[in-house]
Amino acid sequence: MSRVLISDKLSPSAVDVFNSHGIDVDIRVGMTAHQLLESIDKYDGLAVRSATNVDTSLLMAGHRLKVVGRAGIGIDNINLTAATKQGILVMNTPFGNSITTAEHTIALLLSLCRQIPKADSSVRQGKWEKAHFMGVEVSGKVLGLVGCGNIGSIVADRAQGLKMKVLVYDPFVTNEQARDLGVEKVDFDDLLTRSDIVSLHVPLTDTTRGMIDASVMDKMRSGVRIINCARGGLIVERDLKSAIRGGQVAGAALDVFENEPPEDPGLLELREVIVTPHLGASTNEAQENVAIQLAKQMSNYLLTGSVTNALNMASLTPEEAPRLAPYMSLVKQLGSFAGQAIEEGVREIVIEYEGAAASLNTKPLTAALLEAILSPSLESVNMVNAPFVAKDRNIEVVEVKRESPCDYNSMVRLTIEAENHTGSFGGTLFGGRPRLTQIDGINIEAELGSYMLFVRNHDKPGFIGSFGGVLGQAGVNIATFHLGRGAVGGEAIALIEVDQPVTEDILQQVTCLPNVVQVKPLSFD
């Protein structure tokens, strides 16, 4: 039975979902780093929010760990690179709190424009300073959204309901998508100079870190207001403080900070700044949604291998899994054959999907194929880290799709450039079962059994008889025998399925037979 640890506070609904899938759950909120490190190797999955620090040492200690799930969007507390190296899937829940965070953005926007927090505080102090809290209408104002993904697009919709003009800077939004959203797609500088209010909706990456600094704020319209409900670190806080004091920025509403709680008292003392303690996802509905969504995703991965919202592996939905299952078997056998047959360093792997196979979600297939190629020579390789391992070893991976008809209804071809030669392999499905169809340009049709012998030989009379004699004298039963050759008298290949592993002594006898070039024992799950 799979076992999951919940180390941060999640809705009880998550436990119900795990249990309904037959997964054992331990809830241990508030553990120290040392306690977590000592217990993590008992679990197949780890479910967290933002409190647990999933660092390299924790990931390396999780010998059983297959998946880390984050209930929410940000993964600042998870070392994604280390998880990938360890072959541990990392998934988040990017949609469960989208509405909640977008609504919080709108709430801060209105509070900022109408000075609601300051007015509230004044009245509670027994004052009635009506003239001190002159606000501005949002109707007719220009809202600039930096990023227009799940949350940004909802903010755009709500803002248009307030009769605002919405500009969007997002390289990944097409002109057609912008038209459908009713927004104007602009470049970054255009957004800065035209917007009355700028709201951030991008992840924190090396590219976006500190993207709103003094030079950027200088380009903004004088009196601009800035909102950040995305990630701390997008804004250079000391530059924002200076811009507010200098009058370039009229105010800011911040739900996230570079350090949380924020460490700069000067920023918090500014009356023009509204702050909230990272409340973007803090509604009952959002907490329930992300907990349920995460538990379902982790359960599906642990039980069926389906992948949703993964950050270090291609997604494979529960609906796609049955359709891809026979192709998964095919690429695993094809890759395993190639990985066992090639006995030297690999430089390039070219994977060609032809016919019906080209229309599939091939990213999981490629990951599975790379795992199968690399596993015979490397330890602890799986679908999660296989692409990373290939890249780390300077192996170039090329994926090609051809939907045009081929020799079979669908086919997967694999070409591997090694240090001293290039090998090619092809396979297809017959009746839903994997079938090897080509090795180094020589046609052959063979199903792969648990124990196989791969033999290269010169096409001369007597080989089959002498080969069969060696196995017969050794008491090795032949289950299937498949032959192929290039030209008459040229190179030939044989794939032989046997009932048990072949000993080194028998392999040596076969190697010494006349006209034998190579003998390689193979095994397949």
Image (cartoon, rainbow, N blue to C red):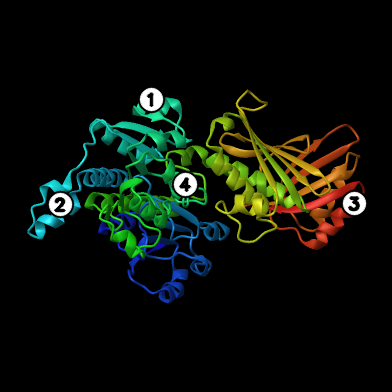
Residue at image coords 46%, 38% = 320
Calculate the distance from the C-alpha at mark 2 to the C-alpha at mark 3. 95 Å
- Is residue 78 rendered to the left or right of residue 284? right
Q: How many marks?
A: 4
Q: Position of residue 460 (x, y in %)?
A: 91, 39
- Does the CB distance between marks 4 and 1 fall below 8 Å? no
Q: Where residue 513 is drawn, which disc sits there?
A: 3
Instruction: Say which amino acid is labelled 4.
Output: Ser
Which comes before the other along the chain, label 2 or label 4? 2
Which comes before the other along the chain, label 3 or label 4? 4
The residue most toward the front is 246
Crowd rating for badge 3 (residues with CA inside 10 Å; few <14, some 14–19, many 20+): some
Disc 3 secondary structure class: loop
Q: Nearer the viewer, residue 12 or 194?
A: 194
Q: What quarter of the picture does the N terminus occupy? A: bottom left
Task: Single out the mark in the foreground, 3 or 4.
Answer: 4
Q: Where residue 215 is drawn, which disc sits there?
A: 4
Which comes before the other along the chain, label 1 or label 3? 1
Task: Single out the mark in the foreground, 1 or 2.
Answer: 2
Residue 140 is drawn in which quadrant? top left
Instruction: Say which amino acid is labelled 3.
Output: Leu
Which comes before the other along the chain, label 1 or label 2? 2
Instruction: Say which amino acid is labelled 1.
Output: Arg
- Is residue 204 rendered to the left or right of residue 272? right
- Does the CB distance between marks 2 and 3 fall below 8 Å? no
Q: Position of residue 24 (x, y in %)?
A: 36, 63
State whether residue 39 is above or below residue 350.
below
Disc 2 secondary structure class: helix
Mark 1 lies on residue: 179
Residue 511 visible in this rendered orientation of the protein? yes
- Does the CB distance between marks 1 and 2 fall below 8 Å? no
Q: Position of residue 189 (x, y in %)?
A: 46, 36
